[in-house]
Amino acid sequence: MFCRFFRIMNNRDLLKLAENLEKLEKLRKQTRNTVVFTAAFVILIFFFIYRMIYGNIVAAKPIYYSAIYICAALTGALPLTVAKVRRRYKKLYNSVIVRNSLERYFEVEEFNSDYGIPKQLIDSTNMIRTGNGYKTDDLITGKYKDIFFMQSDVLMQDRAGVSQYFASRSVTYFKGRWMVFEFNKRFKCDLMVFEKALMLTGKKHTLFLKNDIEKIEFESAQFNSHFDAYTNNQTEAFYVMTPHMMEAVESLRESTHGALLLCFKNNMLHVGVNCGKWAFEPPIFHKIDVASVEEEIDSDIRLITQFVDELKLDEKIYKND
C-alpha cells in the first residue's frame, strides 16, 4: 500500500523522490559513521588520558602534557564535525520529506533548519528566563485555520565556562518545542500559566522570571493543583482563562508529552512544551522508511494543530469585531 506521500506524485516526481532518497541514505550513513567514529574516538582519548594521569606517565614525562592538550582539542573539535555533517543531512531530509507533510496541514511561509524563534521575541514577554545558552533551530512559520504561527526547537540554559561551546557547568531551564500564535486582538493583561513541574529546578534556576506580576488562582481547584498562574491584571485574566479555556488546557496537559507553559502577551500566545527532545528529527541508525517517518512527522505536526483546535483560537472571540 502506498502512503499519502506518493498519492499526488507523477512519474517525474517519483523519479526525483527516488534520487533524493538515495542521496538521503548516503548522508544518513555518513552521519551514522561520523557519530560512531566520534564516540569511539572520544572514549579512547579519555582512556588514554586516564592511563597517562593515573599511570604516573605524566609525572615521569612532562612532555606528555602536550599530548593531553592535543587530545582535549581534538575531543572538542569532533562534535562540531558531527554537527556539520548532521546539519547537511537534516536540511535535505527537511526539504525532501518534512516539508511535504507540513504543506498538507499549513500554509507554509518559511521552513528553515538553520535558525529558530529569536531569543528577543521570548525575552520581550518579560516573564521567561531564556538564559545565556539559548539555542534554537527548525523554524516553521505559516498559517493554520487563518491563525499565523511560528514554531521551533528551543533550548534555554545558563552556562558557565570558557566559551558558549564548552561549559564547565550548565543548568537547563527548558528543552523542547516553542510555539507562538498571533491574533488580531490584543490581550488586555499579561498572563503566564505553567505546569508546576517546570519549577522543579529550584528557586535559583527557574524558567519563570517574575516581573511585577502577582499570583492568581482560578475557580477550578483541579486546575490550580496542576498549574501556577501569574498576571498583572487579575480581573482581565479571568476573561482569558474561562472555564472552557481551563478545561481545554487540562486536556492538552493530559495529551501532551512534556510540561506545558502558556504566556499571553499583547496579541501573542506563547506555548512551550518542555518535552526534552526535538521535532522532525531524521533517523540516523536505521534506514529511512517513508511511511514510518511520515507517521512520526504527522504526530509532531499535531502538537501544533491541537493547540488551535483545543483552545478554539480561530473562533470569533479572539478576533476584532
Image (tube, grey):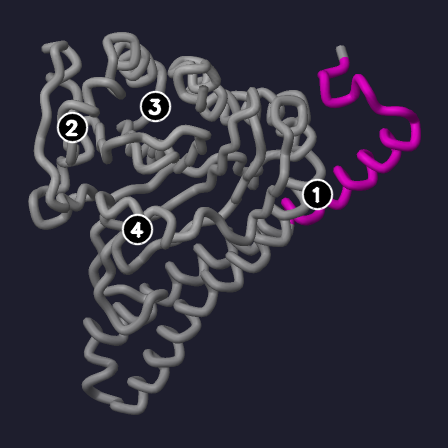
Q: Amino acid at mark 3?
A: His
Is residue 28 inside the magenta stretch? Answer: yes
Is residue 212 inside the magenta stretch? Answer: no
Q: Which mark identifies residue 123? A: 4
Give residue 4's position: percent from left, percent from top.
Answer: 72, 17
Q: Which tag, 4 or 3, sits closer to the chain's start?
A: 4
Callout 4 crowding tier (Cα within 10 Å): few <14, some 14–19, many ≥20: some
Contact between labelled residues 4 and 1, with CB atoms less than 8 Å apart: no
* Residue pointed to by mark 3: 257
Question: From the image, which quarter does the N terminus lie in?
Answer: top right
* Residue pointed to by mark 2: 229
> Horizontal placement of 71 versus 37: left or right?
left
**Cα separation between marks 4 and 3:** 25 Å
Q: Which tag, 2 or 4, sits closer to the chain's start?
A: 4
Q: Amino acid at mark 1?
A: Leu
Q: Which tag, 1 or 4, sits closer to the chain's start?
A: 1
Q: Which tag, 2 or 3, sits closer to the chain's start?
A: 2
Range covered by the magenta-colored residues:
2-29
Q: Secondary structure at mark 2?
A: strand
Q: Secondary structure at mark 1?
A: helix
Q: Residue furthest front?
A: 321
Residue occupying image coordinates x 34% and y 80%: 69
Contact between labelled residues 2 and 1, with CB atoms less than 8 Å apart: no
Quarter location, residue 273: top left
Residue occupying image coordinates x 50% and y 26%: 300
